[in-house]
Image (spheres, rainbow, N blue to C red):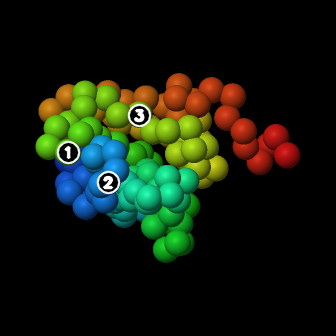
Amino acid sequence: MTDLDLMQAAQDARKFSYSPYSNFCVGAALLTKSGKLYTGCNIENAGYSATNCAERTAVFKAVSEGETAFEAIAIVGGRAGETAPFCAPCGVCRQVLAEFCPKTFRILLGSPKSFRAYTLEELLPFAFSSEDL
């Protein structure tokens, strides 16, 4: 799967976003090392702390099906009907990625038309991990 394919899958996942409060729709596409693709969207809740981000939705779907080795994730977001030029994962999502991914894990941000790759370490330096326990 190419990076462009992964970005398009994230864009497609946005269509399922449930975001009636923020109107900010996010889609994520997570590629496993075995070649499987797991997508996710943000799912809001009136009690905001119960909201789940697209990235965590994709990771949790994969883990719940036995996948824990990941290759890359693409994230596309923005107001409904628009695509933001850049939609980075929140701190909680970065920490969840750090639980399963090495520092060199690739995170693609942008849109299918224009995106950039980052490593997990670039987005979450000094991550807290099992090595810190």
Question: How busy is the neighbourhood of tag 2: few (under 14 within 10 Å), some, or many (20 plus)?
Answer: some
Q: Which residue is mark 1?
A: 80
In terms of sequence position, does the residue under pointer 1 or pointer 2 come before the other? 2
**Quadrant assignment, res 102:** top right
Instruction: Where is residue 56? Give x, y as percent.
Output: 48, 55
Secondary-structure class at tag 3:
loop
The structure residue drawn at horizontal position 34% and vertical position 45%, both measured from the top left corner, is 22
Amino acid type shown at disc 2: Ser
Closer to the camera, 21 or 25? 21
Q: Is residue 120 left or right of residue 34?
A: right
Which mark identifies residue 107?
none
CA separation in Å, label 1 and label 2: 9 Å
Give the alpha-carbon distance from disc 3 to disc 2, as whole Å.
Answer: 17 Å
From this view, report whether residue 115 is shown above or below residue 4.
above
Write the residue at 25% across / 61% down.
16
**Residue 42, relative to residue 63: is it above or below?**
above
Q: Amino acid at mark 3?
A: Ala
Choose mark 1 or mark 3, whichever is in front: 1
Q: Secondary structure at mark 2?
A: loop
Q: Position of residue 117 (x, y in %)?
A: 37, 30
Do the residues under discs 1 and 3 have CB atoms within 8 angstroms?
no
Q: Position of residue 72 (x, y in %)?
A: 41, 45
Against 28, residue 35 (above or below) is below
Q: Please give the label number shown on residue 19.
A: 2
In contact (CB < 8 Å): disc 1 and disc 2: yes
